[in-house]
Amino acid sequence: MKHKPGDAAPDFRLPDQEGNPRGLSDYKGKWVLLFFYPKDATPG
């Protein structure tokens, strides 16, 4: 599935800093900033 800028992000779950699972649906109705960065020590 190819996503375009402006598409809604799919719901996903990942552990937080304390190991508790968190997902986008946990923040429904709130502002959320997703930041993705390239792998460490690579150009970009």
Image (spheres, helix red, strand yellow):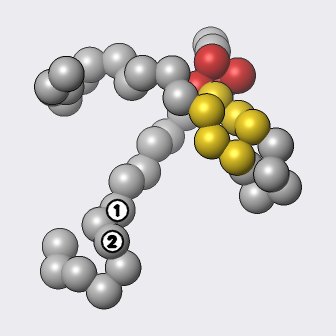
SS type, badge 2: loop
User: Does the CB distance between marks 1 and 2 fall below 8 Å?
Assistant: no
Q: Answer whether residue 36 is visible to the viewer in this image.
A: yes
Is 38 placed above or below 5 here? below
Q: Position of residue 39 (x, y in %)?
A: 33, 71
**Which residue is at a point 76% across and 58% down the rendered structure image?**
17
Q: Amino acid at mark 2?
A: Lys
Q: Residue furthest top?
A: 29
Identified at 63% across, 18% down, the residue is 25
The residues bearing labels 1 and 2 have C-alpha atoms spaced at a distance of 7 Å
> Can the viewer see residue 31 in this picture?
no
Q: Is residue 29 left or right of residue 19?
A: left
15 or 43: which is nearer to us?
A: 15
* Above or below: residue 36 compared with residue 4: below
The quadrant of the picture occupied by the C terminus is bottom left
Badge 1 density bin: few <14, some 14–19, many ≥20, Cα 10 Å: few
Q: Residue at x 26, y 19 (%)?
A: 7
In the visual, does 15 lie left or right of 31?
right
Give the labeled residue for mark 2: 39
Q: Is residue 3 left or right of residue 9?
A: left
| Residue 33 percent coordinates (x, y) | 49, 40
The N terminus appears in which quarter of the rendering? Answer: top left
Residue drawn where x is 34% and y is 62% of the image: 37
User: Type of residue at label 1?
Assistant: Tyr
Q: Position of residue 22 (x, y in %)?
A: 71, 35
Q: Is residue 33 left or right of residue 36?
A: right
Looking at the picture, tell me which residue is in the foreground, 13 or 5: 13
Provide residue 21's location: percent of width, then percent of height: 75, 37
Query: Tag on residue 37?
Result: 1
Q: Residues within 10 Å of mark 2 (few under 14, many from 20)?
A: few
